[in-house]
Amino acid sequence: MTAAVHSLLTPLQRWWNYRDLVRNLVAKEIKIRYQGTALGFAWSLMNPLMITLMYLVVFTYVFRNNLPHYPLFMVVGIIHWNLFSLLVMQSSELLVGNGDLLKKIYFPRLLVPLSNLLVNATLWFMALGILLVLYAPLGGTWHLGLLLYPFYLLLFLGFTFGIMLTLSVLYVDFRDLKHLVEVFIQLLFWATPIVYPLSRIHHPLIVSLMKLSPFAEFSLIFQSLFWADTLPSWKLTLGFALWTALSLTVGLTLFYRRGARLIERL
């Protein structure tokens, strides 16, 4: 038992020793990204706000939607989708883009995708803050179930991180992957109940297939918490937890087995 605990804590201790490097990488990336801009960090909010407003106008005034508190329904889905899509689309070039750093300095390679996750999550929390400010005006109700939101958010980030690791490794040998991901993300957005409720799909087979999708599951979880004011079902929670475990297992396994041998090909 002691040996098992030690084997688990050893890599965590090793990563913790590089905490200053991670902090510097995150601070440097945030500073460089908005250096010299007039609005600074505010630019990180412009893209999600403009996309949300566009869909809000289209589905409220053009294709009318009578769903109760529809703006809240849509904003909840789009905010979380924006974080997922941003992380996934940037993940392909993480190792290749940091090739010079990885060749010159030794540090755990996992810190490169981890720092990217932290950078985007830090900026994304400002958009989440706006959602929380507008939550009640948009029709949301504060309830105790929202206390579980950090747990589901960690599952969501873990699931996304596993995908990031997988794509960052595969891209080294398959450079077309980035363009395939960009196309797939667009298709996946409309195949996920973000701007429409799952109840609007009337074909039983399509509904069953969508319910098996981890992307639909995380969308339904956040809709339950913020829009329906209920706790996600245990089946939904268990299903997404399993998807997260699978994503992390595949991503970490691939990253550690192939990552070290890929450095010379960056």
Image (spheres, rainbow, N blue to C red):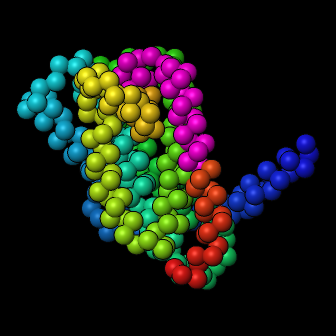
Residue 181, percent across and down?
Answer: 36, 58
> Against 121, is 40 above or below?
below
Q: Nearer the viewer, residue 83 or 217?
A: 217
Q: Quadrant of the N terminus?
A: top right
Q: Is residue 226 visible?
A: no
Q: Report the predominant secondary structure element of the magenta stretch.
A: helix
Left or right relative to 167: residue 151? right
Image point (80%, 56%), residue name: 10
Residue 216, percent across and down?
Answer: 39, 34
Left or right relative to 126: residue 94? right
Image point (71%, 57%), residue name: 16
Residue 206, percent across and down?
Answer: 32, 31
**Residue 209, picture quadrant:** top left
The extreme left residue here reads: 62
Q: Is residue 239 inside the magenta stretch? A: yes
User: Bounds of the magenta span?
Assistant: 223-248
**Residue 262, picture quadrant:** bottom right
Q: Is residue 181 inside the magenta stretch? A: no
Left or right relative to 91: residue 105? right
Q: Nearer the viewer, residue 90 or 235?
A: 235
> Against 24, is 187 above or below?
above
